[in-house]
Image: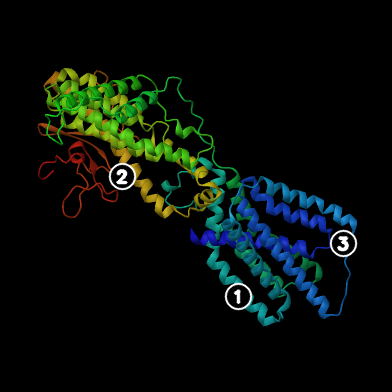
């Protein structure tokens, strides 16, 4: 989108330059012209974008000054002298624009000399380039050959730039018409192309009309005026369309979601667990313990601390949970960084729960260990509620530890614990927030977090080449976490069915409603199809499709060397055995 950004910049400069040239040459009262020019410069204040206002004012002022100097030089060369026409009335009227400028300057935040200098320099250079273009139009002799050469250049430029220009207008129009869907631009293969040819043909027709007017192909004064008015009017609309549409989008960011924070928010208990782990253990030192080893008292204190953390997490899961940071009316980088500082602590809670479950397994309590792993899976899933992309990744990482533990302990878990484990895994799946909702919240949040410059980059898709791979990778990881939860539900349900009937079911529908309320859906399937299941000899195959959406009959995605790979570009299916690296030879 670099070309689109360049086209937007050029059309913005052209729009400001044309208005400034009109203000410098129009016979209307100077106050009217001044207010019009200041009004154009003040348009970015609705965003607010003070730097852009400074640049536009500098560009317009440079054009007005350049035209004024040029006309003064021409009058002086012609021997014309004209005295000052600025009277006391004009001095009083000048109070109006001066007061308006002073009001804006008083409300303007401290930008610093570097930003002031950069915007003033950018505006002055842009205005100077436009003055040079005006001079070329007015001073260079326009014979037939020059007009034909310029016409040929204009036609070639229009043909080359029309597709990119049309794509820019189509993208801006799509974002205005579909503000919510536009936030998921990573999911679109390309910008909607329906109006591309219409806009391209309009641009070519406008250029052709201007060429016809310049070459005097239409005879008669009335025909010339009508042809010129239509041609230049259409061209003016195309020039100002992108700046105006961009200004509208900058002034109308997508609203933040209005999600109510629960009165009894379980995240409070999660934070208590997080802070508990940060508190040093109050255990007296043991001089008889070797250096680097924990004393028996310290080991007992750590085990007790893990039990306390698990109890706090259970208390949190008794309530609804929402991360509060994502509901800020005006997101700030400071608040975002403060939230990121908690991410490591939330991971520490997950490690504590994982150690707690492992200790239960080592103590010969597989049923309690399975419930502890399910508790960890629920804890991880809850970290996505009300969060952004980074929270979704933390949720997948923390909850994934619990899912892996549930997979590894499935053989030793007693059948009597299956119903409770299935219910807790299903609760974890239900608590995990939909990734589409997370992505929409991320888009709305980032529009505000980066200010108007960051929002402009989002509109133009300047960083899409960098953010798109990260988005796709995050989505694949989060869906893989959801897939593990749903596959584990069915895995434990199949074992419970086999325990009751001494045989595997012919299809997953036989698990409902006695064991499962409904067969979980495939998170990768576009049509929300259920998980795949097939009998295989004395066993079965349980899997879901991978990112390609195709059913490969349970075969995992493999690299050329035969190793299982979760590269989104490789076809295959996702199964628990493939996910946790326990495939047998040849599978």
Q: Residue under circle 3?
A: 86
| Residue with the mark numbered 2 | 547
Which badge, 2 or 1, is on the more N-terminal residue? 1
Q: Which structural element holds mark 2?
A: loop
Mark count: 3
Q: What residue is pinned by disc 1?
A: 152
The answer to whether residue 417 is left or right of residue 432 is left
Q: Is residue 308 above or below residue 185?
A: above
Q: CA distance from mark 3 to mark 1?
A: 46 Å
Q: Residues within 10 Å of mark 1 (few under 14, many from 20)?
A: few
Q: Residue at x 67, y 72 (%)?
A: 132
The answer to which of marks 3 and 1 sits earlier in the sequence is: 3
The foreground one among 521 and 448 is 448
- Percent from the top left, x then y, of residue 448? 52, 43
Picture quarter containing residue 74?
bottom right
In the rendered image, the vertical position of residue 72 relative to residue 332, given as above or below: below
Residue drawn at (27%, 25%), measured in percent from left and top?
375
Quadrant of the rendered structure where residue 431 is? top left
The residue sitting at 50% across, 52% down in the picture is 457
Whichever of callouts 2 and 3 sits on the residue coming sooner in the sequence is 3
Front one among 474 and 221: 474
Q: Position of residue 496 (x, y in %)?
A: 17, 22
Give the crowd class for mark 3: few <14, some 14-19, many >=20 residues within 10 Å. few
Mark 2 or 3: in front is: 3
């Amino acid at each position: 989108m670099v070309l689109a950004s360049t086209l937007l910049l050029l059309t913005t400069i052209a729009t400001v330059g044309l208005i400034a040239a009109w203000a410098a040459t129009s016979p209307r009262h100077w106050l009217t012209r001044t207010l019009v020019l200041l009004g154009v410069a003040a348009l970015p204040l609705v965003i607010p974008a003070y730097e852009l206002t400074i640049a536009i004012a500098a560009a317009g002022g440079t054009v007005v000054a350049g035209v004024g100097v040029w006309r003064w030089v021409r009058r002086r060369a012609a021997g014309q002298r004209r005295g000052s026409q600025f009277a006391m009335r004009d001095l009083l009227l000048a109070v109006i624009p001066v007061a308006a400028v002073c009001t804006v300057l008083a409300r303007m935040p401290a930008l610093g000399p570097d930003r002031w200098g950069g915007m003033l320099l950018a505006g002055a250079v842009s205005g100077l380039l436009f003055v040079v273009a005006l001079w070329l139009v007015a001073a260079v002799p326009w014979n037939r050959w020059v007009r034909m050469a310029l016409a040929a250049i204009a036609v070639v430029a229009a043909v080359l730039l029309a597709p990119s220009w049309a794509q820019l207008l189509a993208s801006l129009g799509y974002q205005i018409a579909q503000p919510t869907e536009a936030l998921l631009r990573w999911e679109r293969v390309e910008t909607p192309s329906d109006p591309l040819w219409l806009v391209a043909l309009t641009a070519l027709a406008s250029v052709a009309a201007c060429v016809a007017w310049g070459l005097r192909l239409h005879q008669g004064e009335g025909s010339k005026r009508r042809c010129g008015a239509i041609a230049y009017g259409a061209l003016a609309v195309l020039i100002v369309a992108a700046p105006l549409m961009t200004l509208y989008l900058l002034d109308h960011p997508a609203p933040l979601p209005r999600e109510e924070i629960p009165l009894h928010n379980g995240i409070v208990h999660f934070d208590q667990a997080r802070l508990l782990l940060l508190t040093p253990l109050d255990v007296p030192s043991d001089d008889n313990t070797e250096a680097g080893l924990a004393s028996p008292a310290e080991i007992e204190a750590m085990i007790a601390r893990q039990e306390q953390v698990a109890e706090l997490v259970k208390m949190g899961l008794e309530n609804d949970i929402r991360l509060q940071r994502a509901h800020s009316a005006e997101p700030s980088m400071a608040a975002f960084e403060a939230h990121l500082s908690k991410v490591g602590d939330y991971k520490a809670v997950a490690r504590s729960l994982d150690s707690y479950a492992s200790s239960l397994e080592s103590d010969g309590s597989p049923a309690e260990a399975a419930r502890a792993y399910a508790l960890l899976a629920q804890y991880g899933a809850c970290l996505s509620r009300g969060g952004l992309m980074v929270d979704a990744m933390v949720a997948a990482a923390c909850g994934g530890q619990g899912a892996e533990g549930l997979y590894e302990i499935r053989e030793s878990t007693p059948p009597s614990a299956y119903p409770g484990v299935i219910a807790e895994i299903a609760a974890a799946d239900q608590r995990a927030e939909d990734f589409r909702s997370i992505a929409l919240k991320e888009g709305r949040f980032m529009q505000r977090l980066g200010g108007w410059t960051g929002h402009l980059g989002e509109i133009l898709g300047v960083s899409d080449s960098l953010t798109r791979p990260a988005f796709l990778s995050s989505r694949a990881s989060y869906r893989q976490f959801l897939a593990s939860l749903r596959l584990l539900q069915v895995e434990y349900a199949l074992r419970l069915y086999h325990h009751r009937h001494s045989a595997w079911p012919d299809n997953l529908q036989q698990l409902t409603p006695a064991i499962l309320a409904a067969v979980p859906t495939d998170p990768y399937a576009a049509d929300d199809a259920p998980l795949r299941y097939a009998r295989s000899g004395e066993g079965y195959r349980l899997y879901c499709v991978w990112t390609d959406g195709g059913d490969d009959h349970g075969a995992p995605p493999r690299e050329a060397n035969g190793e299982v790979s979760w590269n989104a570009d490789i076809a295959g299916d996702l199964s628990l055995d493939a996910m946790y690296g326990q495939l047998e030879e040849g599978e």
